[in-house]
Amino acid sequence: MKILKDVGISIENGKDQLKASAKNFPIEVFYLRNGDIPQYLRDGVVDAAIIGENILIEKGNDIAIVEKLGFSTCKVSLAVPKSTKFKSVQDLQGKRIATSYPNTVNQFLLKNKIEAQLHIINGSVEIAPNIGLADAIVDIVSSGSTLFKNNLKEVEVLLNSEAVLAVSPLISSENQKILDKLKFRFQSVLKGRQSKYILLNAPNDKIPDIIKVLPGMKSPTILPLAEVGWSSLHSVIDKNDFWEVIDELKLHGAQGILVCPIENMVI
Ligand SMILES: Nc1ncnc2c1ncn2[C@@H]1O[C@H](COP(=O)(O)OP(=O)(O)OP(=O)(O)O)[C@@H](O)[C@H]1O
Ligand SMILES: O=P(O)(O)OC[C@H]1O[C@H](OP(=O)(O)OP(=O)(O)O)[C@H](O)[C@@H]1O
Ligand SMILES: [Mg+2]
């Protein structure tokens, strides 16, 4: 809902309403059960969906991903009780594994030539070893606190997941055009989230060194300050390089450094 809001699409949905229209963009939004979405896409009931990649891997291998969206990141992991001496995945031979992700687990077992017994359950998977239902589990791990609370330890990551925009194979060319517009807006917001706008003041003789640290989208903007011999530089930096860049800029004589968030970045 936040990414839709950030791309300027406002959804009019009353309390607990499962179908809503956008006020200012030609889409309808359905709030559907996560695990049902791959089938809705396959059948063309919906043209596109925002869904966890882990669910597509489990139930919708045939469905194309349009864009990775960078939120709801999690792993699908194998975990065993803390007290279990676990050396390698071969220790799973003949063991019982509880999971809501049977296809993902079966593929993993096949790849590792392991024969194990699967217990498919829909939720509260982490409790399975404690109630004697299984020797190991495969489930979503994010912070790891659910594993910790249930005395389990993660021993293998089967896959990494994040929210994605997925498309129905039956989408019409008319609706594909709308989806392309949506994808473009998502990309602009995601690039913006990844970047910061930076402004700083520097003596003119330091500008060549500073430009090397600040490549920007094309090249930095340089504006003269009222004080002779000084300029203001504006540029865009990657959020992840932020602190290293600031340290280098200071070394090169930059002053009055301002860093601002970017709402949208259209390249
Ligand atoms: N703790 C978490 N941290 C990050 N992402 C998560 C977490 N739990 C779930 N997700 C992501 O969100 C998606 C939906 O979560 P989950 O499967 O828990 O749905 P749910 O709301 O419990 O739905 P359902 O009731 O249909 O099972 C998951 O497929 C996964 O991609
Ligand atoms: O590593 P953590 O940060 O603890 O997150 C992982 C937990 O989050 C999800 O459960 P959720 O709270 O969605 O409950 P659910 O079982 O009802 O889906 C998932 O099924 C794990 O149990
Ligand atoms: Mg959940």
Image (spheres, rainbow, N blue to C red):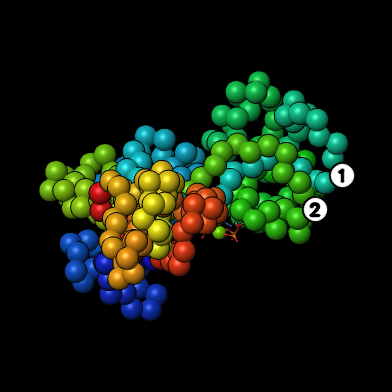
Report if residue 58 is visible in the image. Answer: yes
Quarter of the rendering occupied by the N terminus? bottom left
Farthest-out residue, front = 228
Q: Amino acid at mark 2?
A: Asn
Residue drawn 20% across and 52% down? Answer: 181
> Decide: marks 1, 2 in contact (CB < 8 A)?
yes
Name the residue that disc number 1 marks: 83
Farthest-out residue, left = 174
**Residue 113, image x, y percentages:** 66, 20
Q: Please indicate whether residue 56 sits to the left or right of residue 81 in the image.
A: left
Residue drawn 49% across and 52% down? Answer: 252
Farthest-out residue, top = 113
Crowding at dot 2, Cα within 10 Å, few <14 / some 14-19 / many 20+, comes out as some
**Residue 253, image x, y percentages:** 49, 56
Distance from mark 2 CB to nearest ligand 2 atom below 8 Å: no
Relative to 7, residue 112 above or below: above
Q: Quadrant of residue 92?
A: top right
Q: Please indicate whether residue 57 sits to the left or right of residue 166 in the image.
A: right
Residue drawn 69% across and 33% down? Answer: 117
Secondary structure type for disc 2: loop
Decide which of 25, 263 is in the foreground and name it. 263
Secondary structure type for disc 1: loop
Q: Please indicate whether residue 13 sits to the left or right of residue 106 in the image.
A: left
Name the residue that disc number 2 marks: 151
Q: Amino acid at mark 1?
A: Ser
Please tell me which of labels 1 and 2 falls first in the chain.
1
**Residue 137, image x, y percentages:** 69, 43
